[in-house]
Image: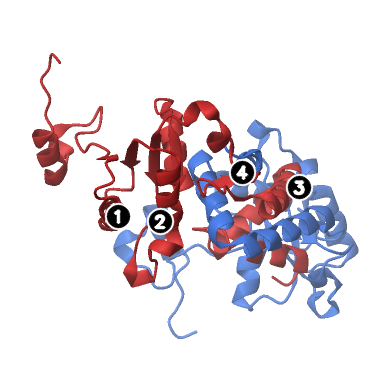
Chain colours: A blue, B red
Amino acid sequence: MAFSPLVDELVESLRCLPGVGQKTAQRMAFHLLERARSGGVRLADALSNAMDGVRRCESCQNFSDTEVCGICENPERSNGTLCVVESPSDLLAIEQTSDYKGSYFVLMGHLSPIDGVGPDDIGIERLLRRVRSEGVTELILATNPTVEGEATAHYISDRLDGSGILITRLAHGIPVGGELGYVDGFTLTHAFRGRKPLLD
Amino acid sequence: MAFSPLVDELVESLRCLPGVGQKTAQRMAFHLLERARSGGVRLADALSNAMDGVRRCESCQNFSDTEVCGICENPERSNGTLCVVESPSDLLAIEQTSDYKGSYFVLMGHLSPIDGVGPDDIGIERLLRRVRSEGVTELILATNPTVEGEATAHYISDRLDGSGILITRLAHGIPVGGELGYVDGFTLTHAFRGRKPLLD
């Protein structure tokens, strides 16, 4: 852009956001400059503070402002149940149900030998140490139902073989509100195998 | 999000970007925190500098770091041709063709009585003053071919009625590389009416 190095730099910087290419970055920059200057200033501050201040929780690896995050510090949540998720957004989705009251461990990824991601990169040793030291009675492996997620779950479960800890995996089945005709075959098979008596 | 006020604030601030909702903002925030911290810091600086330093060019109303923008200051571009566009991105699209060598006037909008946007809001008086004072010989009205864009073009042309200045509008026709079967009827009619002899 010939007319403004500052706008050029803003457009170029916006491209570090996921899914934002040249045109979208331009649209975002012009929108901020034309109609949302105060929003832009607020975003600049929030970015600068977050990039500087957000670290990993020493206990669960999730993003945190403090050494140990609020969930890990909450004594009511140390009830012997530990839920392993792949990412902070998975944790967030579970938190939003308000149903789970235990603690978490965030892998920040999954095992993926093809990308060079091994057990050390996702903190499996830290997880195992925590499971042993905290007296965890149930370990819920809530990794995604993808090839990598399943492999990660199996790896963790293998490493805890013989420990006597109950290791569980989230149920597969038909989504609530879904229509049978649109559900894929694998899910339907799982739903059939996991069927339950109506009056239990 | 229970675990980090800094992350919360970042997600909330990212929502000021156009087309970014809660989920996308979350994905952006996690991406920056996990994989692009340096990009995030750069974006924070760029935003802060741009929000603070970018103003409107006194001459053409476009975004500029200086009182008068580079294009308006360039004496080679004051050749009596002035191109009126609705937005900086339109200017950019024209600049990228490297074909037009005159100067610009950026309306930063179009006439839209329903939204309360009148001639004063898009700087029509400033445009007319500039046309008269600079000895413009051709005024190219490159507003969008929408109802509002056409209305804006007609309004400007009416205001300059009798001034002796050549007022032009961009040609309508089939896009280069387009297929006739997919071109809408209005465009095709314009293309027929604007047909040209092959050997001119």
In percent of width and height, residue B149 lies at 30, 53
- Check whether the beta carbons of the residues at disc 2 and disc 1 lie within 8 A of each other: yes
Q: Name the image quarter holding the N terminus of chain B.
A: bottom right
How far from the left and from the top, in percent, is residue B192?
9, 34
Which residue is denoted by mark 2 in the rendering? B124
User: How far is the residue under mark 4 from the one under mark 3?
Assistant: 16 Å
Name the residue at 79% across, 71% down. A71
Q: Nearer the viewer, residue A29 or B106?
A: B106
Which secondary structure lies at badge 3? helix
Q: Which residue is mark 4?
A: A7
Q: Which residue is mark 1?
A: B159
**Image height check: is B141 above or below A138?**
above
Assess whether mark 4 and mark 2 are in contact (beta carbons under 8 angstroms): no
Which residue is the site of mark 3? B41
Discs 2 and 4 lie in a common subunit: no
Amino acid type, mark 3: Val
